[in-house]
Image (cartoon, rainbow, N blue to C red):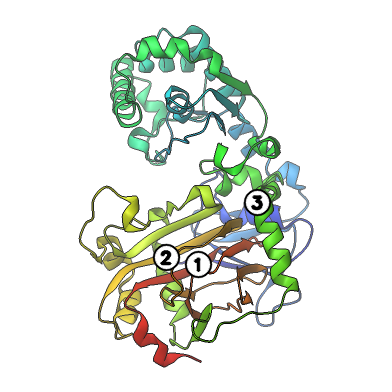
Amino acid sequence: MKPNTFIIRKGLHDNQSYASIMFDPWGEPLNNIVKFVEDENRGSTTHESGTLFETYKDGNYLVIKGKTPQEFFKEYNEMIESTLWIFNNEPFRLLPTEKVLMTGGGLAWLWQALSNNCKNVIICDISRAQIKFLMALLNEWDGDSYGEFVYNFIMKNKIVHFHVNLQEQQDKQMDRLSLLKDKNTFCELLDDNFSLLFKKYCTLKDFKEQFLLIKNKVIIKNINIFNELKNFSIHQINLSNTTNFKYNFCNNSIDKLQDLISPATKVFIKKIKTSKKNIDASTPPCVKLDLKVPVEEIHEEILKIQQYLVPHREDSGLGWSSFCIHGQSYDRTREESYYRDVLPYDWTKEAQEHMPNTIKWLKSLGLSSFKRVRVMCLEPLGFINLHRDQTVSELGPVNIAITHPAGCEFYLENHGVLSFVPGAAYMMNLVNHHAVVNRTLERRYHIIIHGDTRPLLSNSI
């Protein structure tokens, strides 16, 4: 189904508009497009900030009148606050720190607590059911059958809303309640999945013995994790997918994300905005290119690969994700040295299926070879902290804006704020420090080309 586009006049209640447009009633992300403007957008229907929308199965939307956000989101909030997440719906990354802040959904907290470096896991979760489950698990479970413990907990506490999420996949299509009709099958499925995840994330052999030892490591709070962010550094926080969680938009906690922008990044931004450009003519920090980018075609195809976006360099920012169009695989988005082995570079299967026009345009650029070519997504209110990507001063990667909402800024050392608009392209010298802050409720999509990009300098502006 083709995504709907909504234009909202900016105001104090943008988050609620976003929550009603960009997620379905159960909180599943949708592929809609939202644009926030200062004034009327000619030729389009522009809604006031705080307008609430109700969607129907055929994709039509109805403007809700007469309901406050508290009333409109009441059913959703009550559901989320009584939902149990049995397993996580995405792969987990262990943080190599002594203390970690994270949510209590699934068992990621358990694998973190079992890791060698970890001394404290602070769990904050808005679900009362999840908190009750975690307390029971730590105080009552003998460590034998996870499936049986979960089954008995659901039945005893009459849990209606729960997610199983086998093999770290969102179980949207699974009829979860029907699973409970056969206790043995339910328990077997959960125990098999538990064993699979234990082998993936833990090097320990005796789970039961180690499980008894972690109980004093875990602190549990029934509060929104966003209320605890100020007490931790970004490298100590595992926010999972809470940066794209409907609950945090409709309840206005999402704005606290930007409190995690590092002090060094804030100082850098202030300096960039007040200092003069210092350009070495031999190797400038960037060169603008004219690549005649088919923005609309590429954007349409990017919307088709949303499910394949993977978190990217979580220690460097929040809400940053990526997908390889050309590379070792769609989810190998990091530099070669990050991986233990090196696979052949090629157009990924997922990109060939969903992004044929983008590939056709990339091939038309006349480059002799490509390395990584990636879609880079920065979520609403996401940011990339100050860093640099190379130690040798030379031009190389090409950064191309597909969408770039006004209010999202790319700060580049020795240059200033890059003038990105959709279709703008720069060849970058990333020995210069840089940072990106998306202060909007729109997603920023860029494409970055690595490889022998030098021929593109003939297109410089």
Indicate left or right for 252 with 19 as reference: right
Residue 352 at what x, y percent from top left? 27, 67
Image quadrant where residue 62 sits? bottom right
**Residue at image coords 25%, 62%:** 349
Secondary element under disc 2, as helix, strand or loop, is: strand
Residue 232: image x %, image y %? 64, 37
Determine whether the residue tagged by mark 3 lies in a helix, strand or loop. Answer: loop
Q: Residues within 10 Å of mark 3 (few under 14, many from 20)?
A: some
Q: Report the residue marked by disc 1.
A: 445
Which one is nearer the viewer's eye here, 128 or 103? 103
The amino acid at mark 3 is Ser
Q: Which residue is mark 2?
A: 375
Mark 3 or 1, nearer chain start: 3
Height in image: 100 above or below 61?
A: above
Give the residue drawn at x 35%, y 25%: 179
Query: Do tag 2 and tag 1 residues touch (Cβ < 8 Å)?
Result: yes
> Pointer 2 and pointer 3: residues touching (CB < 8 Å)?
no
| Outermost residue toward the left in this view | 344
**Foreground disc of the pair 3, 1:** 3
Is residue 423 visible in the rendered image? The answer is no
Q: Residues within 10 Å of mark 1 (few under 14, many from 20)?
A: many
Residue type at numbered disc 2: Val
| Residue 459, position as x, y percentages in the image | 43, 91
Q: Which residue is mark 3?
A: 262
The amino acid marked with disc number 1 is: Tyr
Q: Quadrant of residue 182?
A: top left
Q: Is residue 455 above or below residue 169?
A: below
In three-dimensional space, the C-alpha distance between marks 3 and 1, rounded to whole angstroms, equals 23 Å
